[in-house]
Image (cartoon, grey):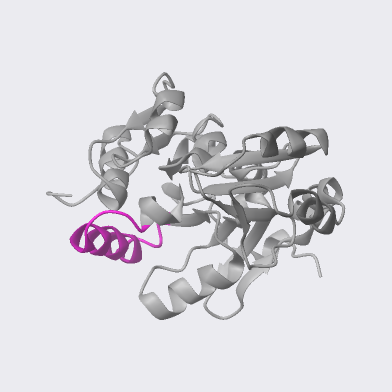
């Protein structure tokens, strides 16, 4: 069933909506930094919205929040932008079907064709998760044959390499940035209230999409070189969770306690 707007959390009144990558970003930094950020979010849920924008799948997101003390987000843009969903402790991760219709149409049940075409390709190991609208591989950088990039393009899909470790095949034109913009527009969130945070190249489209953004201090060099010129982006010195707090302060997007 398609979810109506009246059934989804209202973020229009939140002073800040944090749209953050997980690995290396929201989950990055020291235990103390994460505890400080997570506690501050939980203490300010009336004025702070939370969207996970991640390469992780819905099952991982649910387990992360349920079992590891990570704040539940209001929404998730998962699977490198191919999932757009509501999230809650009661229902878990529930895709918003009408926001995914274009993603599904662009994919068109291509998984088997892509897996067959890249079967045995040097340096690619298929990830075991059965994603809905993507195919993902681990990269052995010593053996990887870059012709995989052209193979995917020739098939009409979008390749993405991040952290020199992962090779994703996505529907053409679909990634974190466009899917986040689709969600923000649907929810009628004021754009200058959204802070995007990331650390690898699969965050590039999100950091480039025009919303206020931060590349945390532990970002991969290839990402830094691509986003350093962006006027709407803060290049953090602090790593992970601390880099997010640094950007909130730098952009003056929400009051923070002294010392944060």
Residue under the image location 51 percent in, 55 percent down: 51
Residue 13 shows in this picture: yes
113 displayed left or right of 57: right
Left of 252 or right of it: where is 95?
A: right
In the rendered image, residue 221, in percent from the top left (x then y), is placed at 37, 32
Residue occupying image coordinates x 83% and y 45%: 106
The picture places residue 108, in percent across and down from the top left corner, at 87, 52
The vertical placement of 25 against 177, above or below, is below
Whether 37 is among the magenta residues is yes
Percent x, y for residue 154?
81, 33
Mark count: 0
**Left or right: 216 in relation to 108:** left
Q: Nearer the viewer, residue 77 or 98?
A: 77
State the image quarter where residue 23 is shown: bottom left
Determine whether, in the image, residue 231 is placed left or right of residue 237: right
Q: Residue at x 86, y 49 (%)?
A: 105
Q: Is residue 171 magenta?
A: no
Residue 122 rendering spot, x and y as whole percentages: 63, 47
Q: Residue at 43% across / 31% down in the picture?
A: 222
Relative depth, front residue between 24 and 50 = 24
User: Residue 140 or 108: which is nearer the viewer?
Assistant: 140
237 shown above or below 62 = above
For the N terminus, give its image quadrant.
bottom right
């Amino acid at each position: 069933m398609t979810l109506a707007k009246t059934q989804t959390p209202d973020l229009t009144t939140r002073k800040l909506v944090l749209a953050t990558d997980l690995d290396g970003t929201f989950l990055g930094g020291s235990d103390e930094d994460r505890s400080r950020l997570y506690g501050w979010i939980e203490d300010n849920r009336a004025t702070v919205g939370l969207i996970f924008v991640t390469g992780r799948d819905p099952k991982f997101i649910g387990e992360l929040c349920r079992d590891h003390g990570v704040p539940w987000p209001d929404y998730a843009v998962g699977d490198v932008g191919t999932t757009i969903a509501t999230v809650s402790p009661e229902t878990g991760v529930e895709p918003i079907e009408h926001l995914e219709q274009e993603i599904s149409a662009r994919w068109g049940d291509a998984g088997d064709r892509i897996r067959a075409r890249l079967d045995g390709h040097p340096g690619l190991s298929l990830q075991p998760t059965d994603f809905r609208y993507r195919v993902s591989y681990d990269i052995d950088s010593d053996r990887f044959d870059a012709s995989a990039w052209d193979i995917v393009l020739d098939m009409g899909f979008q390749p993405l390499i991040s952290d020199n470790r992962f090779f994703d095949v996505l529907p053409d034109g679909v990634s974190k940035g466009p899917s986040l913009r689709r969600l923000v527009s649907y929810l009628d969130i004021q754009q200058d209230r959204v802070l995007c945070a990331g650390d690898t190249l699969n965050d590039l489209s999100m950091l480039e999409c025009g919303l206020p953004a931060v590349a945390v201090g532990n970002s991969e060099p290839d990402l830094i070189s691509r986003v350093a010129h962006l006027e709407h982006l803060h290049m953090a010195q602090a790593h992970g969770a601390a880099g997010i707090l640094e950007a909130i302060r730098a952009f003056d997007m929400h009051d923070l306690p002294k010392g944060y």
